[in-house]
Amino acid sequence: MGESRPRPKGPDIRLVKRGLRQKFRSIRQNLDPQDKAAWDRRITANLLRSPRWRRARRVLLFVSKPIEIDTHALISTALRQKKQVLLPRCLDEKGHMAFFAIQSWEDLAPGLYGLLEPDPARCPQIETFHPTDFCLVPGFSFDAQGYRLGFGKGYYDRFLSRFTGVTAGACYHCCTTQMLPHGRFDRPVDYLFTERYVRRLAQPDAPIPKLKER
């Protein structure tokens, strides 16, 4: 018998993801500012109307960067609604972060990457989570199964692996796609919010929905 030939290697998923991040970063950077502002308002409204949001006493959010869905109004509304608002703080450059409860914007200070994060001297760290907790997850893109293309640091990947509550992605429709590369340990989000629709995403073994406007 002859020697078996080595199987051809597939594409390096890290390079594929790097290329996709460049693609979706470019799309976001070239959005018309008026369109982006209008889409941000629609996505925020969709989130606030969601039964999952309304039932949640505790919400895990993030302070957005200019390239992301604007979360400032969402955070302010959650505080006015007397929800417990948790925001992340990066603990190191190795993908570890923790969530802290804030009472106001005054509880924030520039963190590891210069972004506003909870000041641990003012805010208690929360380490236990509940099934009704609502976590908004950032990402460059989301697909029809709820998998996300993150920013490449691994912070949310680590956190979501142990989070037991409801997860939701917020994304511009132009940055959604039918399928993203993902690993077996990646966890899809439960809901996807865009300026066009709110969708409960596919469960294991369920048909993959087409991401089309309703």
Image (cartoon, rainbow, N blue to C red):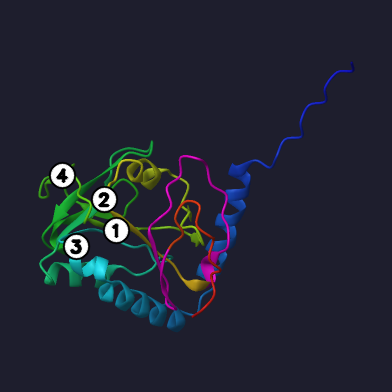
Separation (CA) of disc 1 from disc 2: 6 Å
Labels 1 and 2: the sequence-earlier one: 1
Q: Amino acid at mark 1?
A: Phe
Residue 25 x, y percent position in the rendering: 53, 62
Q: Nearer the viewer, residue 84 or 5?
A: 5
The x, y position of residue 70, in whole percent, is 34, 70
Question: What residue is disc 2 on?
Answer: 88
Q: Nearer the viewer, mark 3 or mark 4?
A: 3
- Asked which secondary structure carries label 4, the reply is strand
For marks 4 and 2, the one nearer the N-term is 2
Q: Residues within 10 Å of mark 3 (few under 14, many from 20)?
A: some
Secondary structure beneath disc 2? strand
Give the side of residue 115 with respect to residue 28, left or right.
Answer: left
Residue 192 at x, y percent in the picture: 41, 65
Check residue 125 in the rendering and tell me which mark sits there, or answer none. 4
Residue at 19% x, 66% y: name it: 55
Q: Are marks 1 and 2 in contact (CB under 8 Å)?
A: yes
Q: Main secondary structure of the magenta part?
A: loop
Q: Is residue 180 left or right of residue 62?
A: right
Which residues make up the magenta segment? 174-200
How packed mark 4 is, by other alpha carbons closer than 10 Å (few <14, some 14-19, many 20 or more), is some
Which residue type carries mark 4? Gln
- The residue positioned 58% from the left and 58% from the top of the image is 179
Label 3, on which residue?
56
